[in-house]
Image: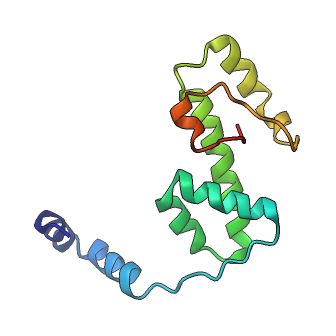
């Protein structure tokens, strides 16, 4: 950790305490996916955002799955919406029908920038 980061943490004692607790006293959640689709969601969550994955993994089992799915759905929507390589003629109908496509097990969207597709190779 850099000296600058140490100074920043010392200037904010609450954040320093939280950082120490997270680093040294965190109880790792025992996560056991109940299905292949849940395993895939966990894998995608870790690929798309390690920081959100860490926070979501700390949640109680009852909240973990719905929050994980909620995050991944919003991330997929945001990926399509933010991608300037997707023409509006494609983007708008895709976003407007997105909720219907969530119900389809084989729906894919390959119109995003190839750099973004690395996160969702066959899911959006």
Q: Which image quarter is the N terminus in? A: bottom left
**Camera-side residue of 62 and 89:** 89
Q: Residue at x 60, y 57 (%)?
A: 45
Coloration of the structure image: rainbow
Q: Quadrant of residue 37?
A: bottom right
Q: Which image quarter is the C terminus in? A: top right
Extreme residue toward the top, this view: 89
Give left or right: position of 49 versus 39. Answer: left
Residue 42 placed where, x, y %?
Answer: 66, 62
Q: Quadrant of residue 40?
A: bottom right
Q: Say above or below: 6 vs 37.
A: below
Residue 62 placed where, x, y %?
Answer: 74, 73
Residue 16 placed where, x, y %?
Answer: 27, 76
Q: Residue at x 37, y 86 (%)?
A: 24
Q: Quadrant of residue 76?
A: top right
Q: How many discs mark residues in the rendered view?
A: 0
Q: Residue at x 57, y 41 (%)?
A: 118
Residue 116 placed where, x, y %?
Answer: 55, 36
Give left or right: position of 83 versus 74. Answer: left
Extreme residue toward the right, this view: 104
Give left or right: position of 86 versus 17. Answer: right
Q: Residue at x 63, y 54 (%)?
A: 44
């Amino acid at each position: 950790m850099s000296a600058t980061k140490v100074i920043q943490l010392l200037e904010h004692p609450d954040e320093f305490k939280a950082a120490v607790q997270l680093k040294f006293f965190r109880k790792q959640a025992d996560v056991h996916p109940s299905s292949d689709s849940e395993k895939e969601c966990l894998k995608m969550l870790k690929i798309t955002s390690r920081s959100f994955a860490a926070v979501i993994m700390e949640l109680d089992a009852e909240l973990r799955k719905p929050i994980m799915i909620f995050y991944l759905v919003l991330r997929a929507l945001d990926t399509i919406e933010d991608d300037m390589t997707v023409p509006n003629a494609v983007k708008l109908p895709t976003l407007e029908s997105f909720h219907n496509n969530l119900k389809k097990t084989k729906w894919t969207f390959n119109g995003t920038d190839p750099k973004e597709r690395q996160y969702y190779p066959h899911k959006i």
